[in-house]
Image (tube, rainbow, N blue to C red):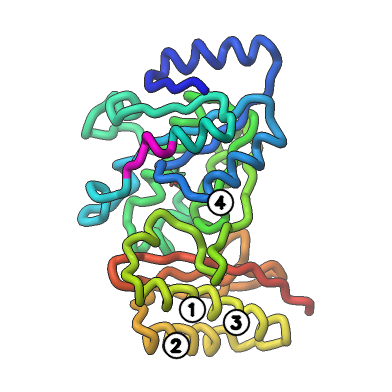
Amino acid sequence: MQQVSKIKRLREQLADVRRSEKTIALVPTMGNLHDGHLSLVKQVQERADFVVVTIFVNPTQFVEGEDFDSYPRTVDADLKQLDLLNVDLVFTPDSNEIYPEANNVTTEVTVPELDAIYCGQFRPGHFKGVATVVTKLFNIVQPDIAIFGKKDYQQLLVIHNLVKNLCLPIEIIGSETMREEDGLAMSSRNQYLSESEREQAPLLYKILNEIALNIEKGAKNYEKLEKEAIFSLKQAGFRPEYLKICDSETLKSPIERELVIIAAAWLGKARLIDNVAVQTYD
Ligand code: PAF
């Protein structure tokens, strides 16, 4: 496995790969890899000849006061795991490499229709940071395919939109959320939970599933379902930011058959997000 931290070096390596007509897959991560990330790697290994994993804790997607400084950084352990999986190349740039314009980011990418709703409302600027860094990584690596987890559902839609709107020739794969045995979606931020909060945490997924079941059985009063769910979460000690039943492609009011129930809620120091897809049949 090669590890490079400079764009120039990465491009030299990838030029050789392209000359041999191999397809390239990109797995962008912020490191602190868990089984969810490793499953993304395994999936693209089935679909591309050469797999590039990037590890970069992107400062521009953290909002003032968030956990940028304390975000878990475990590069050595990450590299060991990726090596065991036979990843071809790991890109570990520093901030100056990705943001040559230094602290004063001058060129940004936004997907306005998704930028300020749900997670974007509570984390202003977050999706601009994600869209900007992912566009940079796409330009640096120029992959044929790239994979992202569905746990960050709004992020996945942002990326689908930016690829479509900027006419980028990259196939985006959305991967099913990997879960712990009790249903909690895997996330690097789960380690912020205390022992008792960790026991309580799967309730979020359980509640989203209950709503999905009710909708499948014909429930139509979405507002009531949302309110009851938020009430149950609060009763259990969560601090919900939003819980919404929406159209799975636009995140607008549910007008199509394909819906998604999305939610973000704090539990102690951890901000948990999750979602469940649901179909209506009428
Ligand atoms: O999902 C993540 O880990 C990050 O948002 C991403 C896509 C690697 C961009 O920094």
Earlier-in-chain disc, 1 versus 4:
4
Tell me residue 130's x, y (percent): 41, 44
- Of the 4 image quadrants, the one containing the C terminus is bottom right
- Judging from the image, what secondary structure is the residue with disc 3 in? helix
Q: Are marks 1 and 2 in contact (CB under 8 Å)?
A: yes
Q: Which residue is mark 2?
A: 232
Tell me residue 153's x, y (percent): 53, 58
Earlier-in-chain disc, 3 versus 1:
1
Q: Which mark is residue 222?
A: none
Q: Which residues are magenta?
A: 73-78
Comparing labels 3 and 1, the label whose residue is closer to the camera:
1
Q: Which mark is residue 149?
A: 4
Q: Which residue is mark 3?
A: 211
Q: Amino acid at mark 2?
A: Ser
Q: Which mark is residue 203?
A: 1
Tell me residue 139's x, y (percent): 49, 26
Q: Are marks 3 and 4 in contact (CB under 8 Å)?
A: no
Give the distance between the C-alpha atoms of the residues marked 1 and 2, in whole angstroms: 9 Å
Earlier-in-chain disc, 2 versus 3:
3
Above or below, 157 relative to 29: below
Q: Residues within 10 Å of mark 1 (few under 14, many from 20)?
A: some
Residue 187 vs residue 212, the one in the foreground? 187
Residue at position x 33%, y 24% in the image: 97
Earlier-in-chain disc, 4 versus 2:
4
Comparing labels 1 and 4, the label whose residue is closer to the camera:
1
Residue at position x 39%, y 85% in the image: 236
Q: Amino acid at mark 4?
A: Gly
Q: Residues within 10 Å of mark 3 (few under 14, many from 20)?
A: many
